[in-house]
Image: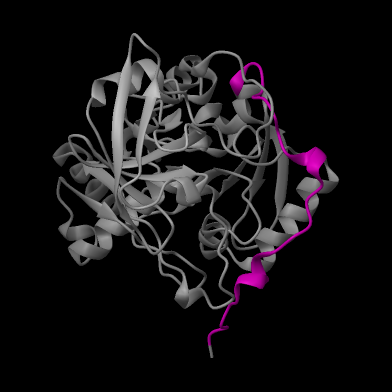
Amino acid sequence: MARKFKTSDFNYELPQSSIAQFPAEPRDHCKLMVLDKKSGNLNHVKFFEILKFLQEGDLLVFNDTKVFPARLYGTDKKSLKPIEILLLSKIEDGLWTSLVKPGKRMRLGSKFVIGNQQNQIHGVVEQVNDSGSRIIRIDDDSLIYKLGELPLPPYIKKSVGTSDNYQTVYAKHEGSVAAPTAGLHFTQGLLEQIKLKKIETLFVTLHVGWDSFRPVKDENLENHQMHSEYWELSDEAAIKIKNAKNDGRRIISVGTTALRLLENVADISGGYENIKGGTGWADIFITPGYEFQIADGLITNFHLPKSTLLMLTSALSSTDIILDAYKVAVKNNYKFYSFGDAMLII
């Protein structure tokens, strides 16, 4: 009988000192733990040495989403007190799903203003969702890029310098509130080396939502609801995926976001053989016991306790193997989370 997992099965102890506060410099000089997903055997190298573990013909799948300045600071018009808004996803022009602080000031019908005398966004709360998020309407989307700030994760307490430090070098399509952090380790030079080794690459788009940092609160995994994230897959990418699977070549996802897109598309298509280009919304929740249809391997960072990303990572190997590897990572001073070190699971 398959083991029934609880949220607490994905908990682990992590010292605060292990949480990375700034990125490695250069990007590809962070630590890399290479994990055999079946045996649990480990290798410890630097990220730029990843080519030693990749083969000619492998297909690397990158998420080319770009983080946009989704954090806005403003004032509640009634109380004249400060508020903070995090835009999560765009429903239509001027209408956004968002998180707000403090919630008690942003009730249904609350009006607010963001900006200064030269540039102002005026808005209103149109709906309060059961999850605590809000649907807000604002009068000028274009000013978001003048007034907004890049939304760093809550556990990063220090400045990271330029905003480029929280973007992949191949970021292209704006729409994420969080970076696909496994991709932060790649440099243009490393991408060129990958090409020279005849490792195939393709780019897909999934706009990362706030679930990346949201721990699962209910002990029963079946009660956790994933937020939907918008994705795009080109016809060319679909063909590359099918060809790699048919040839028996490995498909390695660069990050959990690209992996969720791949498996979501396979699920809704009825198998990799039927996938084609398109767009949609992914809310796939991958936990141990899931049978992967496309991904054979994963490049990823070290994730939060009790997070959906840790559960997904465990599904690709096993919970025991992953948590044992995390213990080794702590002991060997690996850095965790968005700016932390990396793991290759193959």
Expressed as whole percent of the image width and height from the top left, the position of residue 249 reads 36, 48
Q: Residue at x 44, y 22 (%)?
A: 191
**Coloured how?**
one colour
Tell me the quarter of the image containing the N terminus: bottom right
Q: Is residue 229 magenta?
A: no
Instruction: Farthest residue to the front: give it.
Output: 78
Q: Note whether residue 191 is visible.
A: yes
Location of residue 74 with respect to 102 vertically, above or below: above
Location of residue 167 with respect to 227 vertically, above or below: above
Image mark count: 0
Q: Is residue 255 left or right of residue 258?
A: right
Instruction: Farthest residue to the top: give it.
Output: 118
Residue 75 image-quadrant placement: top left
Expressed as whole percent of the image width and height from the top left, the position of residue 154 reads 61, 39
Magenta residues, dominant SS class: loop
Expressed as whole percent of the image width and height from the top left, the position of residue 173 reads 29, 28
Instruction: Compare residues 83 and 156 and report the one nearer the observer.
Output: 83
Instruction: Farthest residue to the bottom: give it.
Output: 1
Q: Which residues are magenta?
A: 2-27
Instruction: Compare residues 140 and 209 and report the one nearer the observer.
Output: 140
Instruction: Compare residues 275 and 4 and report the one nearer the observer.
Output: 4
Q: Residue at x 46, y 47 (%)?
A: 210
